[in-house]
């Protein structure tokens, strides 16, 4: 049975992101403005950038593509860390982030038991 490591999967995701970015670049070469006018906003919606500051497993490939469209390619080591965090279920925040403050409406959620 094939066993793939988080690093190998991260490199595969980075390569897929590069291939997709090349296709977006080809579209931009044929139809000027399509990248910034239509493709990138649609990808940002699908990536849930505003909803989820930390990527979910579903959002991660789209975020890799968005990073591939930038000037600096995505780092497979960072992708591997995200994969390990998501697959292992660890909900720890990055070391550089401040602790999350409770939401203002958290006390108004009556569906949770007290």
Image (cartoon, rainbow, N blue to C red):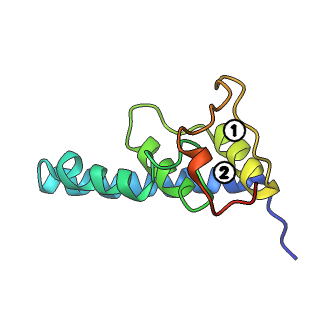
Q: Residue furthest right?
A: 1
Task: Measuring from the top left, give residue 104's x and y in whole percent.
Answer: 53, 38
Residue at 66% x, 51% y is 10
Task: Measuring from the top left, give residue 80's x and y in whole percent.
Answer: 71, 46
Quadrant, the N terminus:
bottom right
Task: Measuring from the top left, give residue 36's x and y in whole percent.
Answer: 21, 45
Number of marks in picture: 2
Give the left or right position of residue 110, taking residue 49 as reference. right
How many residues crowd around disc 1 within 10 Å: few (fewer than 14), some, or many (20 or more)?
some
Task: Measuring from the top left, give residue 5's x and y in whole percent.
Answer: 80, 56
Q: What is the distance, in whole Å, between disc 1 and disc 2 at their CAs?
A: 7 Å
The image's mark for residue 10 is 2
SS class of the residue under badge 2? helix
The image's mark for residue 37 is none
Asked if residue 97 is positioned above or below residue 56 in the image, the reply reads: above
Residue at 76% x, 58% y is 87
Tag 1–tag 2 contact (CB < 8 Å) = yes
Q: Which residue is mark 1?
A: 77
How many residues crowd around disc 2 within 10 Å: few (fewer than 14), some, or many (20 or more)?
many
SS class of the residue under badge 1? helix
Q: Nearer the viewer, residue 108 or 25?
A: 108
Give the left or right position of residue 44, taking residue 114 as reference. left
Asked if residue 11 is positioned above or below residue 3 in the image, the reply reads: above
Give the left or right position of residue 54, taking residue 63 as reference. right
Q: Nearer the viewer, residue 66 or 8?
A: 66
User: Between disc 1 and disc 2, whose residue precedes?
Assistant: 2
Residue at 46% x, 41% y is 67
Quadrant, the C terminus:
bottom right
Q: Residue furthest bottom?
A: 1
């Amino acid at each position: 049975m094939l066993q793939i490591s988080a690093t190998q999967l991260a490199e595969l995701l980075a390569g897929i992101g590069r291939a997709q970015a090349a296709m977006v670049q080809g579209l931009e070469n044929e139809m000027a403005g399509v990248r910034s006018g239509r493709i990138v906003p649609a990808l940002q919606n699908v990536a849930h950038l505003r909803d989820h500051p930390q990527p979910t497993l579903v959002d991660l490939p789209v975020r890799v593509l968005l990073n591939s469209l930038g000037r600096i390619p995505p780092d497979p080591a960072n992708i591997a860390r995200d994969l390990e965090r998501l697959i292992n279920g660890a909900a720890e925040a990055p070391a550089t982030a401040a602790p999350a403050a409770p939401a203002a409406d958290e006390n108004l959620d009556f569906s949770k038991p007290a």
